[in-house]
C-alpha cells in the first residue's frame, strides 16, 4: 500500500473517459493494489471519495467512505468504505439541490453545483458481486461528483453560475455564513 499523489485539474487523465475494468481484472492483484493505494490516499488526504483517475489510473473504479452523523457536511447517513467498479448512475428524480463542492483534484477552490437529489447506482464490488443503491440528498451529490471523474468531468464543469466559484479562504469569509452547505469530495 502506498499514498499516491492526487493529480490536479489540468492533468490530461482527469479529462479522459476511464475504461471499464474487464471481469478478469476485478479482484486481480493489480486492482487490489490500486484499491489499497486509493484507500490509503483517501485517508491521507482526508476526503470522502476518490476515483482512480485522480491517482492517474484511467479505469472505472471509485471509493466512497462517509463517517455519518454530525459532520462538517451536516448530519448525514454513514456510508462504510465501499468500492464501486464500473458503476452506472441513473437519475430517478431530476429535482436538484445545490451544495458548495470542493475536490482533491481542484485544491483551494469551492463551487456551487446543483445536482439531482435522487439517483440509483448499479455497480460491481471489488469481489465481482453486483450491487445496487438508491440514494437521496447529500449522498446522491457525492456519488455524482465521484462518478463524474470516471467520465472525464470535474465539478467546475457543472457550475451554472461561474461567479459562484471561489477560493476557499474567500468562501469561508464571505459566502459560507449565508449560503448552502458545503462538501469536500
Image (cartoon, helix red, strand yellow):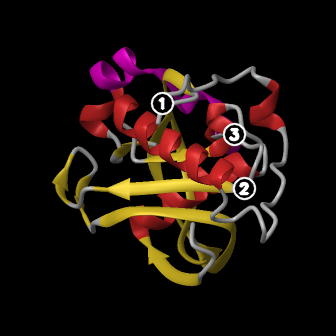
Label 3 – label 1 distance at C-alpha: 16 Å
Q: Hey, which quadrant is residue 76 in on the image?
A: bottom left
Q: What residue span does the magenta drawing correspond to?
A: 156-174
**Which residue is depicted at the point 25% across and 56% down?**
67
**Which residue is depicted at the point 63% across and 22% down?**
8
User: Where residue 175 appears, x then y in whole percent?
Assistant: 35, 29
Which of the two marks, 3 or 1, is nearer to us in this view?
Answer: 1
Pick the front one: 175 or 79:
79
Q: Earlier in the sequence, mark 2 or mark 3?
A: 3
User: Where residue 15 appears, x then y in whole percent?
Assistant: 81, 36
- The magenta stretch spans residue 162: yes
In the picture, the disc for residue 2 is 1
Q: Earlier in the sequence, mark 1 or mark 2?
A: 1
In the picture, the disc for residue 53 is 3
- Element class at badge 1: loop
Q: Magenta span: helix, strand or loop, mainly?
A: helix
Pick the front one: 138 or 170:
138
**Which residue is depicted at the point 34% across and 41% down?**
179
| Farthest-out residue, front | 29
**Which residue is depicted at the point 54% across and 27% down?**
4
- The magenta stretch spans residue 167: yes
In the picture, the disc for residue 60 is 2
Q: Hey, which quadrant is residue 7 in on the image?
A: top right
Residues packed near mark 3 inside 10 Å, few (<14), some (14 to 19) or many (20 plus): many
- Element class at badge 2: loop
Amino acid at each position: 500500500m502506498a499514498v499516491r499523489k492526487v493529480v490536479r485539474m489540468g492533468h490530461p487523465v482527469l479529462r479522459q473517459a476511464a475504461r471499464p475494468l474487464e471481469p478478469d481484472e476485478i479482484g486481480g492483484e493489480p486492482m487490489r493494489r490500486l484499491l489499497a493505494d486509493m484507500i490509503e490516499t483517501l485517508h491521507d488526504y482526508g476526503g470522502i471519495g476518490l476515483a482512480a483517475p485522480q491517482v492517474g489510473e484511467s479505469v472505472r473504479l471509485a471509493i466512497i467512505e462517509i463517517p455519518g452523523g454530525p459532520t462538517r457536511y451536516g448530519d448525514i447517513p454513514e456510508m462504510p468504505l465501499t468500492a464501486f467498479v464500473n458503476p452506472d448512475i441513473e437519475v430517478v428524480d431530476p429535482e436538484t439541490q445545490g451544495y458548495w463542492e470542493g475536490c482533491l483534484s481542484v485544491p483551494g477552490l469551492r463551487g456551487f453545483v446543483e445536482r439531482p437529489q435522487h439517483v440509483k447506482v448499479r455497480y460491481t464490488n471489488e469481489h465481482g458481486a453486483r450491487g445496487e443503491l438508491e440514494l437521496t440528498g447529500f449522498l446522491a451529490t457525492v456519488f455524482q461528483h465521484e462518478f463524474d471523474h470516471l467520465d472525464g468531468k470535474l465539478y467546475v464543469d457543472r457550475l451554472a453560475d461561474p461567479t459562484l466559484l471561489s477560493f476557499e479562504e474567500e468562501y469561508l469569509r464571505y459566502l459560507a455564513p449565508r449560503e448552502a452547505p458545503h462538501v469536500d469530495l
